[in-house]
Image: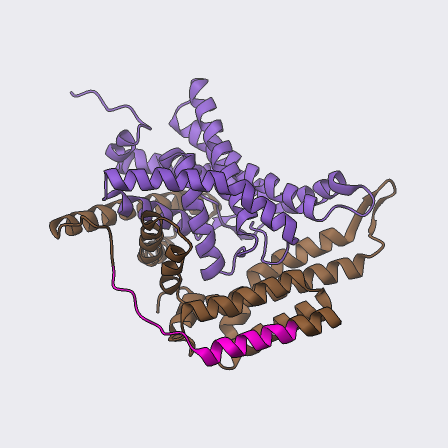
């Protein structure tokens, strides 16, 4: 358990051992289809495909998927509603194509979010970072991203522990106390992150860190059957989306 | 407030990615040079990225009764400077998209431009201006965090207005709409984030003064 539901789902997913490149191809294709195809039937098909694959073969818990989609859903609904309203000389009113405009925007965004969630809930970030090297991102940047990923769980655990202790001491009982506690909480997390980085640095220096933070990458072989099924599925979605 | 996946049309997603790219590449070059000269900087920069991510998990009581989350880029810009924040902010946005479903991959460029470029630079500018006008560290930090938050929100509203112009009044009308809708949460949050910054740096001045002196934010205390 890492404390982040999507990351937990990724490590526990039935697709965890699949090649990250295979999953990137499938989910990237779905994201592009969600964006480029007409909302009906293209985006609807993409959304359904992503959800069925996540809940079915990838065995992502429905609760995790439902909770994860809350953030984007709130933004999407607020944004779509705002775009459907028009500001004219007579005040606020519905745009002439309000329903179509809001519906299309919501469908594109929900389908795209579902496709990204399929990738996020089946592939831990540590599996995706080596793919950045293939995109010619400098090794130093990938290493910083790797340290960020590994350290954020430690800091999140510290954050929760300190907040629990503050709450137990009535640190969040009033608005004023809550602000003071939040400031102290942020300062404690920052100084702990510096302290942890310093101790890691001393430990690694003692082991002669001269070639960066190299780790042995886990080999997750590509599957021809998975790639063929992904290509066929994406081609079918494009064909139906364009014809529809 | 990050733009969700699929919310921007393809030309806008590509355009904002191209707009953010020079800043992020510049930040990446700075990081590469820093790591080449001081290999241990990898860990400190990673810690800074993790702190920025975690800061967005700190709940602030909101004036509207609910709770909000700070962006943290203003504090990052003061502590680590805007070029580094362009890269760290983009890494944090990527992780927020993949770990929290907050933001997206095709909207990463647009979100990076608002959150990792405009926010930190505007916040850092406000900090420098406040210090140049004779303000102390804490007023400077308040200005940095509040302005970074507001600048991020105004930029995001502008990006949405360009992508979704109003049917009657075009981009200006859409800008008014998006600014009004998100002002309900973002303006109180900007003030709240400024207050959090003051409390954070006040605690750091007491508990981590050597680090603030090393970062050039405080002058070394004269030896007694």
Residue A8 in sight in this render:
yes
Q: Relative to residue A66, is residue A196 depicted above or below?
A: above
**Is the C terminus of chain A in the top left, top right, bottom left or bottom right quadrant?**
bottom right
Residue, far left: A206
The residue at the point 45 percent across, 47 percent down is: B90
A148 or B206: nearer the viewer: A148
Q: Colour of chain A?
A: brown
The residue at the point 45 percent across, 67 percent down is: A6
The chain shown in purple is which? B
- Residue A142 in percent (x, y) is at 35, 52
Which range of residues does the magenta coloring cover? A215-237
Residue A59 in sight in this render:
no
The residue at the point 40 percent across, 56 percent down is: A132
**Is the N terminus of chain A in the top left, top right, bottom left or bottom right quadrant?**
bottom left
- Residue B210 in percent (x, y) is at 24, 33
Give the main secondary structure of the magenta stretch: helix
- Residue B58 in percent (x, y) is at 43, 51
């Amino acid at each position: 358990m890492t404390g982040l539901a999507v990351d937990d789902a990724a490590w526990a997913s039935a697709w965890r051992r699949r090649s990250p490149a295979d999953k990137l191809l499938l989910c990237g294709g779905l994201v592009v289809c969600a964006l480029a195809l007409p909302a009906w039937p293209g985006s609807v098909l993409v959304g359904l495909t992503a959800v069925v694959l996540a809940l079915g073969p990838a065995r992502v818990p429905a609760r995790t998927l439902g909770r994860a989609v809350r953030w984007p859903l709130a933004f999407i609904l607020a944004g779509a509603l705002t775009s459907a309203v028009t500001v004219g000389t007579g005040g606020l009113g519905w745009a002439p194509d309000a329903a179509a405009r809001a519906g299309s925007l919501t469908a594109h965004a929900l389908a795209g979010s579902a496709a990204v969630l399929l990738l996020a809930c089946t592939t831990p970030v540590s599996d995706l970072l080596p793919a950045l090297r293939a995109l010619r991102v400098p090794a130093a940047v990938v290493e910083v991203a790797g340290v960020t990923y590994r350290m954020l769980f430690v800091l999140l655990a510290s954050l929760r522990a300190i907040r629990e202790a503050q709450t137990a001491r009535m640190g969040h009982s009033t608005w004023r106390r809550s602000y003071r506690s939040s400031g102290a909480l942020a300062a404690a997390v920052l100084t702990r992150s510096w302290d942890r980085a310093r101790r890691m640095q001393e430990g690694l220096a003692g082991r002669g860190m001269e070639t960066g933070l190299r780790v042995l990458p886990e080999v997750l072989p590509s599957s021809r059957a998975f790639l063929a099924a992904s290509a066929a599925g994406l081609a079918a979605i494009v064909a139906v989306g364009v014809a529809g | 407030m990050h733009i969700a996946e699929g919310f921007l049309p393809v030309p806008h997603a590509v355009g904002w990615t191209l707009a953010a790219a020079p800043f992020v590449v510049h930040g990446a070059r700075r990081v590469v040079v820093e790591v080449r000269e001081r290999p241990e900087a990898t860990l400190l920069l990673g810690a800074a990225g993790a702190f920025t991510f975690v800061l967005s998990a700190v709940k602030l009581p909101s004036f509207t009764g609910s709770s909000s989350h700070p962006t943290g880029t203003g504090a990052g810009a003061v502590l680590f400077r805007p070029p580094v924040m362009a890269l760290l902010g983009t890494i944090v946005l990527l992780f927020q998209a993949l770990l929290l479903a907050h933001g997206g991959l095709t909207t990463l460029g647009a979100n990076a431009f608002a959150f990792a470029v405009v926010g930190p630079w505007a916040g850092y500018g406000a900090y420098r201006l406040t210090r140049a006008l004779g303000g102390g560290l804490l007023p400077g930090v308040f200005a940095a965090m509040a302005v970074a938050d507001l600048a991020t929100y105004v930029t995001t509203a502008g990006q949405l207005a360009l992508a979704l112009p109003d049917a009657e009044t075009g981009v200006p009308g859409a800008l008014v709409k998006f600014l009004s809708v998100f002002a309900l949460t973002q303006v109180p949050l900007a003030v709240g984030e400024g207050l959090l910054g003051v409390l954070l740096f006040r605690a750091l001045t007491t508990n981590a003064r050597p680090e603030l002196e090393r970062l050039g934010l405080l002058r070394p205390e004269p030896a007694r």
